Image (tube, grey):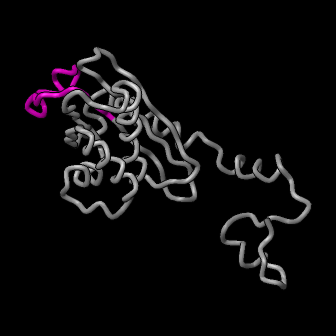
Amino acid sequence: MIQTLEDLLESINTPPWDLILIGDGSGVGWDKSSGWAVCMIDRLGGYRKFFHGFVSAGTVNWAEAVCFTHPLRYDFFQVNKGKLKSERKVLIFSDSQVTVHTGNGLYPKDANGDVWAQIEFFRSKGYKLTYHFTNRSTFALHTLVDQISKANAWEIDDEWMNEQAYLTLPSRSTLPKGPDSLSASQDSSGTKPT
């Protein structure tokens, strides 16, 4: 079992690095919330920082991939003010084989292409990204990001939020309850209610 940062690095033959991103995403499908969490370890800055979030609808593969874009944005735009002085070697740890294989160029970037376009942006700016597969139970920090991503995804009450969308700004006309009901709610002129 990996217990220290050094153990983690030794498990992949201790390559040179500037940033380590340990992340996880959780979700079910477009009808439910999706959450993610990442711990960034900055060797040069000497600190660790957590990033996490959720969206009201998203797939697990999207969450597994997108979680790494936010800490990269933070490092590039906030820490480095939009310009790297030199190449940044980034080790990315994920329990998603799809994310690891896609990030390393073994799978096509068709699914979630918008996320992979963001990753390519950071590569074009000088980030050398290497993805590594790790089982969730291999070390405690990855277990923690998994727990946070699940809390972000599954402790959100989607049904209540959707209900509030109707209750907090009511309309004098009847609004359809979702995209599947739009065609059924057209009036005789073919227009949809707003």
Instruction: Identify the magenta region.
Output: 1-22
Q: Relative to residue 101, is residue 70 drawn left or right?
A: right
Q: Quadrant of the C terminus?
A: bottom right
Residue drawn 70% across and 47% down? 161
- Does residue 132 show up? no
- Does residue 74 show up? yes
Most distant residue in the top direction: 46
The picture quadrant where one finds residue 87 is top left
Vertical relation: 12 (above or below) 49: below
Residue drawn 24% across and 18% down? 44
| Total tally of numbered discs in the picture | 0
Check residue 177 for magenta coloring.
Answer: no
Q: In this orientation, which residue lies closer to the viewer: 194 or 92?
A: 194
Residue 43: x %, y % from top left: 24, 20
Q: In this orientation, which residue lies closer to the viewer: 187 or 81?
A: 81
Residue 67: x %, y % from top left: 40, 41
Residue drawn 29% across and 43% down? 95
Q: Relative to residue 171, is residue 67 drawn left or right?
A: left
Residue 162: x %, y % from top left: 71, 52
Residue 58: x %, y % from top left: 50, 54
Most distant residue in the bottom direction: 188
